Amino acid sequence: MATQVTSATPTCCGKNSGGECVCAKQATCSCGEKSALDCSCEKAATENALSGARCSCRARPAGQCTCENANAENRAVSGNTCVCGSRPAGSCTCERAASNPNEIDFTTQK
């Protein structure tokens, strides 16, 4: 499993041990045979990709959580949502999480 995913993040479910997110370590690929992001079945190309909205531990896509927190993670989002609409407003985990029209990105400007 990718090291950056097992590290406890601000959106992690809060169950961390030694700086690692317990839920991320529990997460499996959709076939259930391997750890999340270590899939080797015919779905490996999509299962091992880290793009789009993710569950809290970031090991699985949003709405497809497989850890012990799956019941809460896989519920439909109600109320305010993040920009992509897949997560609650305060816990966006996709590439658009830092997108703000009032911010100036100096890293890509000459």
Image: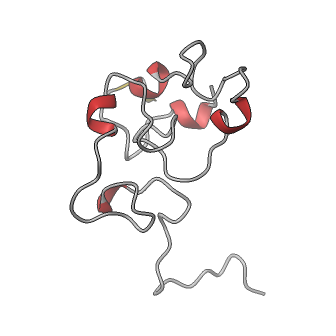
The N terminus appears in which quarter of the rendering? top right
Can I make out residue 4 in this image? yes
Can you tell which quarter of the image residue 87 is in? Answer: bottom left
- The percent position of residue 84, horizontal first and vertical second, equals 45, 64
- The percent position of residue 60, horizontal first and vertical second, equals 51, 36
Can you tell which quarter of the image residue 95 is in? Answer: bottom right
Left or right, residue 17 beside residue 80:
right
Can you tell which quarter of the image residue 13 is in? Answer: top left
The C terminus appears in which quarter of the rendering? bottom right
Image: 88 above or below 35: below
Can I make out residue 21 in this image? no
Residue drawn at (71%, 29%), measured in percent from left and top?
Answer: 44
Residue drawn at (68%, 76%), measured in percent from left and top?
Answer: 107
- The percent position of residue 31, horizontal first and vertical second, equals 57, 19
Left or right, residue 99 beside residue 106:
left
- The percent position of residue 88, horizontal first and vertical second, equals 30, 56
Image: 105 above or below 18: below
| Nearest to the observer: residue 12 or residue 75 | 75
Image: 22 above or below 83: above
Report the residue that reaches farthest toward the left. 79
